[in-house]
Amino acid sequence: MRMRIREAQKAGYANIAVVCGAWHVPALTQPTTIKDDSVLLKGLPKTKVEATWVPWSDDRLAYASGYGAGIESPGWYRHLWQSPDRAGLRWVAEGARLMREEGLDASSASVIETVRLADALAAMRSLPLPGLAEQREAMLAVLCHGQPEPLALIRRKLEIGNRLGTVPTSAAAVPLQRDLEAQQKRLRMKATTEIKPLDLDLREENDRQRSLLLHRLNLLGVEWGHLQRNSNRTGTFRESWELRWQPEMIVSLIAASRYGNTLEDAASNKLCERARGGAELPLLTGMLDQAVLARLPVAIDVLLVCVQTQAAVAADLTHLMSALPPLARVARYGDVRCTDVAALHPIVEGLVERIVVGLAAAARHVDEAAANKLLDHMAEVQTALDTLDMAMLRDDWLDCLTVVTTDDAVAPAVRGYALRLAFDKQRIPAEELARLAGLALATATPPAESTGWLTGLLRGSGLLLLQHDVLWRVIDAWLAGLSHEVFIERLPLLRRAFADFQPAERREMGSKVKQLDAPAAARQTELPLDHTRATRVLPVLAAILGNSAAN
């Protein structure tokens, strides 16, 4: 740095400004000679480097970001610079405006009293004008009504701010960064550090292009947008994003430039590199789902080959079951982004066939932890088959579940959950459900096995109990027959079985208990039909429905 300063002085520049951290200032001001610096630099290896500018933001200037040499309140100092006339009044007015935008009460009278209180505090402390501390105390007492939450909002959005700097187009930048800037301008997506929601309709070309941009950036590790879980992109063709730009994302973008000069090329090359690196089948199918969302045809072709290769040799059934849901989503809804996924159908059919053949064997003689994990995978397979809506595959899966329900070597929880899935899809009638429940909850069955079976049967929803009185009475008789010690021992597992029930389902169960506990005579009492009163309704019905209805 000293050598560059001397070069500038030698070139004739009189006023030289050096932008650096405070730690470097003593080294620049100490007296040294050109000879001393030349000796210091002699022998050091030379490295070719390129530099670019990164736009900084208000929150990165603040101490809150952890940057020790930052400014505590950049928004406040910018306000003082831009509003030298009556800065205090303008500051309180800005705070009131911000509160109104957030739906909070901030009247003009509160603004006037806040300014007066700030002036009084400054006078008491022998200050010529109120500073930031006086403004905070006055806002908290009057404008925020003593509540710290509105003051925290003012602190975050006004004192610190959310402005993002800009870099001139003439500054050096990598091609990948220029491609992002061009797409941001074309799609009208301004980068800002403020959190903003973005709802996209994938049937519209502009929104579809925005979605592709955000998905490609996520693949490169530049998480400008976070896809919200409540968005139902498969059913409504919509995506909900939450956008927030951070200055360090430019650094991640520059690091990703080794994969290509455009976002599409870089994202494709990165996915291809990961796919050829020996990724397992579930990871490959997840990457394929991402490639379809980002519309990367080159990566899709590579991933299809890798998925087909891995699916042919994969021996772990859980890997096959985990790989099916992403493939099902891609096969059913990939065409929303105009992606050809016809090559996926043979792969999906092969996976389902291997899952159907291997499920019973994989569920035999496994412990409770392994059985619970298998339940999650079974739920994923069921969701995937519902998404695909292919009758042949669904029938094969339900036939497999029917066989599992009667296999005594299969883990009890798996048998119970298989029975639940098959019954929900009307493959097993209610009479068979009651019979299997009676066998599984019989006195001769160990309580641990009965509890596991019941946990699988009731997994996720209590509608089965609410809709079938026979099953309710079987479970009630089984619980009543448990000894006190066994009941206390199995109670945690029983509570786990009921933990996923909705509050409305629990209320209905309470009402059902009252009805079933009522005396049998009271439930079966039939009121006699009064034919005289019934005939009085006929003229009214004839007038409503017409004279022909009276006959």
Image (spheres, rainbow, N blue to C red):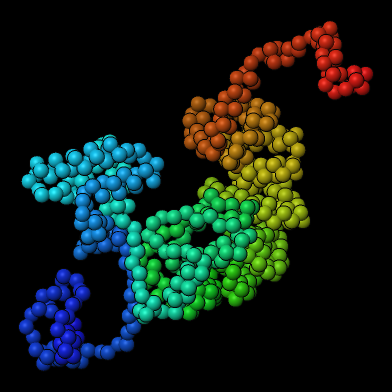
Q: Position of residue 23 (x, y in %)?
A: 15, 71
224 displayed left or right of 449: left
Q: Nearer the viewer, residue 531 or 407?
A: 531
Q: Does residue 218 show up?
A: yes
Instruction: Identify which residue is drawn at 37% across, 72% down.
Output: 251
**Number of numbered labels in the structure image:** 0
Instruction: Identify which residue is drawn at 62% across, 56% down.
Output: 237
Q: Position of residue 91 (x, y in %)?
A: 25, 49
- Looking at the rendered image, the quarter that the C terminus falls into is top right
In the rendered image, the vertical position of residue 527 relative to residue 371, given as above or below: above
135 displayed left or right of 107: left
In the rendered image, the vertical position of residue 184 relative to residue 138, given as above or below: below
Classify residue 516 by image quadrant.
Answer: top right
In the rendered image, the vertical position of residue 121 relative to residue 34, given as above or below: above
- Looking at the rendered image, the quarter that the N terminus falls into is bottom left
Classify residue 245 by image quadrant.
Answer: bottom left
Instruction: Identify which residue is drawn at 60% across, 35% down.
Output: 462
Q: Position of residue 455 (x, y in %)?
A: 58, 39
Classify residue 502 by image quadrant.
Answer: top right
Q: Nearer the viewer, residue 148 or 43?
A: 148
Q: Nearer the viewer, residue 446 or 72?
A: 72
Q: Does residue 63 show up?
A: no
Instruction: Identify which residue is drawn at 66% across, 42% down.
Output: 420
